[in-house]
Amino acid sequence: MSNHEPTPPNPDLADQAGMAPAAEPEPADLSLATRLAELEARHADVSDAFLRAKAEAENTRRRAEDEISKARKYAVESFAESLLPVKDSLEAAIAIQSATPEQLLEGVHATLRQLAAALERNKVLEINPAPGVKFDPHQHQAISVVPAQQEANTVVTVLQKGYVISDRVLRPALITVAGAG
């Protein structure tokens, strides 16, 4: 028994032997070849579109990272710009050698108003609860509980104002709280 497979006919040998050459591809083979060519062209288009979309997404990501970097770097610019007049006022006050205490006090009040306006423009707002306001642990820090003629767990005095920027607490207000009577 032989392990040899039959060899396919060689078209050149077929011609030499006087045999008819292989037949032309059938119409079904042509439609498969056409379909294959169409699918390969479609695959090339989809691959190209994918690569372009991927490159565009990468460019968009890079631009967004650049914008975030710039925003972080220059975020304080507006705030610093609004504080410059306050610094100018303080320097002008120091430059006046013969100022009276009344003039200095007037200048300090004017400078404080400038600072308050600069903070407010930049959304830095005071937390200064009035006496009797309910204690809010998100905005207040109770330093002590004192006996008072008011409802328990309410603000008695503000020892130090607090501040928020937008809705975030920068520093809670330091307060005393009324104890249970």
Image (cartoon, rainbow, N blue to C red):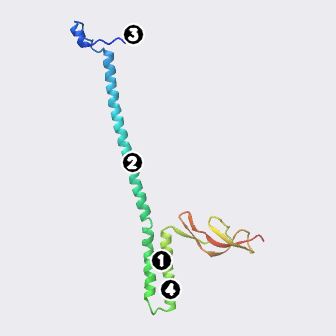
* Mark 2 or 1: the one toward you: 2
Amino acid type assigned to the residue bearing label 2 in the image: Glu
Q: Would residue 168 appear left or right of 59 to someone viewing this image?
A: right
Amino acid type assigned to the residue bearing label 4 in the image: Glu
* Mark 4 or 3: the one toward you: 3
State if disc 1 and disc 2 touch (CB < 8 Å): no
Q: Residue at x 64, y 68 (%)?
A: 140
Q: Would residue 75 appear left or right of 157 to someone viewing this image?
A: left
| Residue picked out by circle 3 | 2
Is tag 2's residue or tag 3's residue first in the polypeptide sequence?
Answer: 3
Residue 129 visible from this viewpoint: no
Return the x and y of residue 108 as percentages of the image width and height.
50, 83
Q: Residue at x 49, y 81 (%)?
A: 110
Mark 2, other Cα within 10 Å: few <14 / some 14–19 / many ≥20: few
Specify the farthest residue to the top: 18
Task: Work out how far the residue at label 2 is from the one at label 4, CA to CA, in angstroms.
Answer: 58 Å
| Residue picked out by circle 1 | 114
| Residue picked out by circle 4 | 106
Q: Would residue 149 appear left or right of 116 to someone viewing this image?
A: right
| Residue picked out by circle 2 | 58
